[in-house]
Image: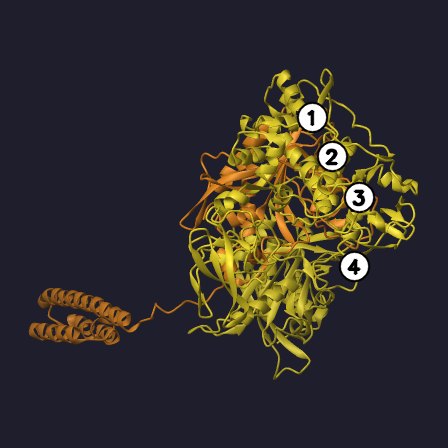
Chain colours: A orange, B yellow
Amino acid sequence: MADSLSQQIQKALSSIDACADLEILDELRVSLLGRQGRITALAQTIGTLPVEQRKAFGADVNRAKEVLQSALEKRQALLARVAIERRLKEEFVDCTLPPAPELTGFLHPLTRTQQDLEWIFRDMGFRHFAGPNIENEFLNFTALNMPEQHPARQMHDTFFVDIPAAPEGRFLLRTQTSPVQIRAMRAWGAPLRVFSIGRTYRSDADATHTPMFHQLEGLVIEEGIHFGHMKSCITEVCARFFNINALTLRLRPSFFPFTDPSAEVDIPCQRKEGRLIMGEGDQWLEILGCGMVHPKVLEYGGLDPKKHQGFAFAFGIDRLAMLKYCLPDLRSFFDGDRRWLESCGFSPYVIGDR
Amino acid sequence: MKFSLSWLRRHLETTATAEDLSTALTRLGLEVESLYDAAAALKDFVVAHIEAAEAHPNADRLRVCRVHDGTSVHQVVCGAPNARAGLKVILARPGVVIPSTGSVLQRTTIRGIESCGMLCSSRELCLSEEADGIAELAADIPLGLSVAEIYGDQIFDLSITPNRADCFGVRGIARDLAAAGLGVLRPLPADSLSPSYDFPYKISYGDDDAQRYCPFFCAVEIRGVRNGSSPPWLQDLLKKAGQNPISALVDVTNFFALDRCRPLHCYDVRAFVGTPVVRSAHQDESFRDLKGKTHTLHSFMSVLADETGPLGLLGVMGGERSASTLETSTILLEAAWFAPEAITRTGQALCLTTEARTRFERGVDYATTIADLKAAAAMIVEFCGGEVSEVLRLGAPPALPPAITLPLDLFEKRVGVSIEKAEIVRLLQALGCTETAPHIFQPPSWRPDLTLPENLCGEILRLYGFDKVEVRSLPNYPKSYAKEMPAYTLDTFKRQLAGRGMIELVSFPFLRSAWAQLFQRPEAQSIELLNPISSELSVLCTSLLPHLLEAVAKNSRRETAPFAFFEAGPVFDRQFESYERPMIAGVRSGILAAYHWGKRSRPVDVFDAKADLEALFGMRVAAFELRQGAPSWFHPGCSGTFFDGETPVGVFGLLHPEVLATFDIENMPVVGFEVYLDALKEAPLKEVGFVAYNLPSVARDFAFVVDKNLLAARLVACVRHAGGPLVSRLDVFDVYSGSPLTDDKKSVGISVIFQPQTATLSEEEVQTFSHKIVHAVSEQLGGTLR
């Protein structure tokens, strides 16, 4: 009887070892150790045995169960591992294939330049004041000390619109962001530290002029503000915008009707290996106009020129973008060419320098 | 304003070099656009003599010249019609740089004949604008002389700001340089004119307007002149200033315009019929100017006229009829002062820009009118002979502008620099101001721009030097305006759309009127430009879509790809507050995943545009009502409008096929959206409190059979309302029409998730909610459970 048990164990062990399939292995387990399994059945024969044999037989059967159980588990682990390996071998995706296509978006370089400037100005304590695109002659010219026959008024090729004239004169597309100076003075009074970014229009179209362009206007009217402060303010703006550590600008006397003294400001630069390097060099590039606010402009803005003084400045954002990001042709800004926009545009997720 | 160093030196005694002067001019605000060193450029050009000029055997228009330069003879092929034997010319030999082109002259063979040089025109040497053949030199100039000896000079070209009338004359520029310490202003020669007879005409004002236009009119008559060439020194000055010498009479008037900013005019009195008069022009009176162009005059202009009509348009241009010629023997020489505004208005109305207008409209010095007139008359007599009449004075020069009180501390207050009082006085005096009493300065008659103490500060600073002002840091601003930043700025919207794969465009807000009409609501009142760049682009944009569609059309001619563009900018309508509203719009076009190995390709559809719009709306979308249909430029059946109450905030849809056809977009789906950003900002943000849902949710699917034209939004709203506050999520997972449903029905599958917040839902409760939903759909929309 004991022989028979050990023979059965040997037989079972060899069929477990021979088993190559997890399902068959499970069937085998059921046939051996299941409720109606052979070993289970064997264990149930214990009652038929003489009492003195029962103890030894019981121990044998239990050992047999343990041996088989352990062999089954080992085999099962092995087969499971083999099955996973086989699956991993069979499952294959060419991961060099492209994923589903997505469009990539870009911000226009002008937007990026405006964002850069907005950061700088807000950080320097300037508030933003937005002005309308359609202005009247009074705010665009007269209040900026450009009376009707003023020669400077002819420097602007103004677009007029067909809205019937008001007491403030005809309506036009603003030729400069400077009317915002008057609007801001009237709305907020002094002290004032304000900037405005916006579109401006002149009927001009050639290689370097487009009928629409963008300007940034700055105005500071505070106690004791003088020409020296203006120099430091515009220097800081330019240095921060172009990431220049030490910058010395060149101020040339010039004429704007709304400031006196007025200056055109040049930034030093040089060409190196075809690139324009800003901040140092023996060449000068005109970059902005500025000056101490003209007393008449203060009056038009509702301030008393005897009490208040300050400075104003303006620059072309399009030109700044061209200089900072090495974009040669202004006209391509407004051309809507996908290839240009992708190559010169900016990721919406990047803040700061690219 | 172009002039030579030699001209400047007539007024300025200086040892400064041209470079020093150039730097000083720019520092003074007289911007040097260019400084051309004609001496350096011309030193390798030599004077030569054409010994023989024969026809080129292979070309009718060319001549083969034998040219002697004093040391050797060269063969030169020349195409100029005036190349002839015996002429003194300017020879350029191979290797020389031609100033007008910057290119190096090469030895060449022209139609089989070797040419070892070039005979130059004065234009090629940048000496003048004219190009009538090669330059002809005087016969007595020695051969082999460097042309630099004859024409060598430094040529300045300045850009004069409109406030500086005085610097439209070389003398004014010299005065500024002297004030800045670069030399001494030479005194003008004394009056040497001796009139020999009375002024023969009784010229008077015809009317008061003419006197306002021309408050001061002076003239002399000069008899017995012989007009001819002006002397070489004058021709040389004029040429280097970019002017062509014409005749002695014309050259003298041009000289005074450039030299002293004193425009003069010379009338040939042979043209006079009766006594001339200074009068207003008759409305629509015809005037033929000395260049032969006819103008129709307005009554606000003034003319010198005789019985037959205008002789000259005062302050702007002379007339053809009275222009001086080589036969002229008696002239009326006019020197006058005109109201600057009147000249501007006249010039603008006729679109006439002349040297005279440029000066008079900025304000010519009235105090020296007669002195300059006499000096000019003396020069004419010197060149042409003749006798001069007494001076006619009509009217009076304007009074000097009021003196300016300069508060002692104003300069320091404005500039932040302290300058000694004596130095301030010295600087202002150097500019021509006189101190009439302590701190009171009388500006000179040639500086009409100086009217305020602030102007004087500007002048002092200009002479002191902008670069010497010490930089002072801007004080820290005491207040922070960070809170003013709106939660959603335009930037946020732009970044969002770019993040969704769209490319930002910027375009001009001008539309063709045909396009504008396509994108106009019936109630719109568009705004037009009165003076557009081209009549094609005359309407201010009423929508941003036309330019976006244009970009799609343009780009799709270059490449086949799906495009996604957006733009943010104003749209215009005269009903809008301040005539504009900020808008953001986008388009998407083409086939998505057209060339992908795995994804099914599909055309863009209306839901792509709707998704963009909902992304922009964010949580605000819950507050908006969506209705089918959008403005006429969208497909009426495939478009929608979001409303905030009764205010439309955004539209989206498939673009109307006829609109696309206008842009030559065919066989390509294009969807788009438009949002009024100002409406969006006003929409409240939805505030949602956070609740931690730890209880299990229950899902139920419903399939309703409803009328085919029932909008999904109505069904969803009905289900959501009936389901009550526990409905946490609602998805439309199926829309089906077809067998076995009748043609007028469709089936809509809706999945509802109930999320209890306080206690687990029982099966009975879920049943109750489900019944409520089914009941509501049946009652309100006539739908049945499928």
Residue depicted at 74% across the width and 34% down the height = B375
**Measured Cα–Cα span from mark 3 to mark 4:** 68 Å
> What x and y, as percent, mark residue B711?
67, 70
Q: What kind of element bears circle 3?
A: loop
Residue corresponding to mark 1 = B432
**Measured Cα–Cα span from mark 4 to mark 2:** 62 Å
**Measured Cα–Cα span from mark 1 to mark 2:** 21 Å
Q: Earlier in the sequence, mark 4 or mark 1?
A: 1
Residue corresponding to mark 4 = B525
Indicate the chain on which mark 3 is placed. Answer: B
In depth, the one of B9 and A260 nearer the eye is: B9
In depth, the one of B265 and A148 nearer the eye is: B265
Indicate the chain on which mark 4 is placed. Answer: B
Mark 1 vs mark 3: tell me if same chain: yes
Nearer the camera: disc 3 or disc 4: 3
Label 1 is placed on what type of residue? Gly
Q: Earlier in the sequence, mark 3 or mark 2?
A: 3
Quarter the N terminus of chain B occupies: top right
Q: Earlier in the sequence, mark 4 or mark 2?
A: 2
Residue corresponding to mark 3 = B224
Horizontal relation, residue A133 to residue A121: left or right: right
Name above or below for residue A273 compared with residue A255.
Answer: below
Residue corresponding to mark 2 = B375
Q: What kind of element bears circle 4?
A: loop
Q: Is residue A160 visible?
A: yes
* CB under 8 Å between discs 1 and 3: no
Label 3 is placed on what type of residue? Gly
